[in-house]
């Protein structure tokens, strides 16, 4: 069992930055690929970024490539999403998830989800 808790969301002006964290409890965190997803009002949840269990491979949606960076610290059971050059289209609830496998196309159906953290970017 893995519990995921996101933090770091908030209100930021366009062009600004935020760093999201996802703290995991459970001894098997390092067994999973980790992904970040987001859901804007009235839209479906979409893939944002993912990282392999070792951290050696990272994947990004085209919409965030070059602006967002995903990383993980297996010693501290935490995955991060550094978000730079934010724009209003990035406004959404951001979720982290633990999955068996992730690639550039997304992740296998996640086994665990966090509760989400709101990111709002003002113009």
Image (cartoon, rainbow, N blue to C red):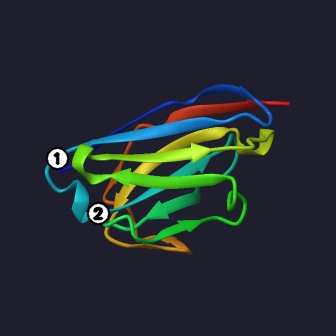
Which residue is identified by label 2?
32
Q: Residue at x 31, y 59 (%)?
A: 111
Q: Residue at x 68, y 57 (%)?
A: 64
- Expressed as whole percent of the image width and height from the top left, the position of residue 29 reads 23, 54
Residue 44 visible: no
Which residue is identified by label 1?
26
Residue 44 figure quarter:
bottom right
Q: Nearer the viewer, residue 18 or 24?
A: 18
- Judged left or right of residue 106, residue 99 is left
The secondary structure type at the circle numbered 1 is loop
Near mark 2 (Cα within 10 A), the count class, few <14, some 14-19 or many ≥20, is many
Q: Is residue 94 above or below residue 71?
A: above
Q: Residue at x 54, y 68 (%)?
A: 59
Q: Is residue 45 above or below residue 118?
A: below
- Expressed as whole percent of the image width and height from the top left, the position of residue 26 reads 16, 46
Q: Is residue 110 above or below residue 12?
A: below
- Judged left or right of residue 64, residue 32 is left
């Amino acid at each position: 069992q893995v519990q995921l808790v996101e933090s770091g969301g908030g209100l930021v002006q366009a062009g600004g930055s935020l760093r999201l964290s996802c703290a995991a409890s459970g001894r098997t965190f390092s067994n999973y690929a980790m992904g970040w997803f987001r859901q804007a009002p009235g839209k479906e949840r979409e893939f944002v970024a993912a990282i392999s269990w070792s951290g050696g491979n990272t994947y990004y949606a085209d919409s965030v490539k070059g602006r967002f960076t995903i990383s993980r610290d297996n010693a501290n059971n935490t995955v991060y999403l550094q978000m730079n050059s934010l724009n209003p289209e990035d406004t959404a609830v951001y979720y982290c998830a633990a999955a068996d496998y992730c690639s550039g196309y997304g992740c296998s159906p996640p086994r665990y989800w966090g509760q989400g953290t709101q990111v709002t970017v003002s113009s």
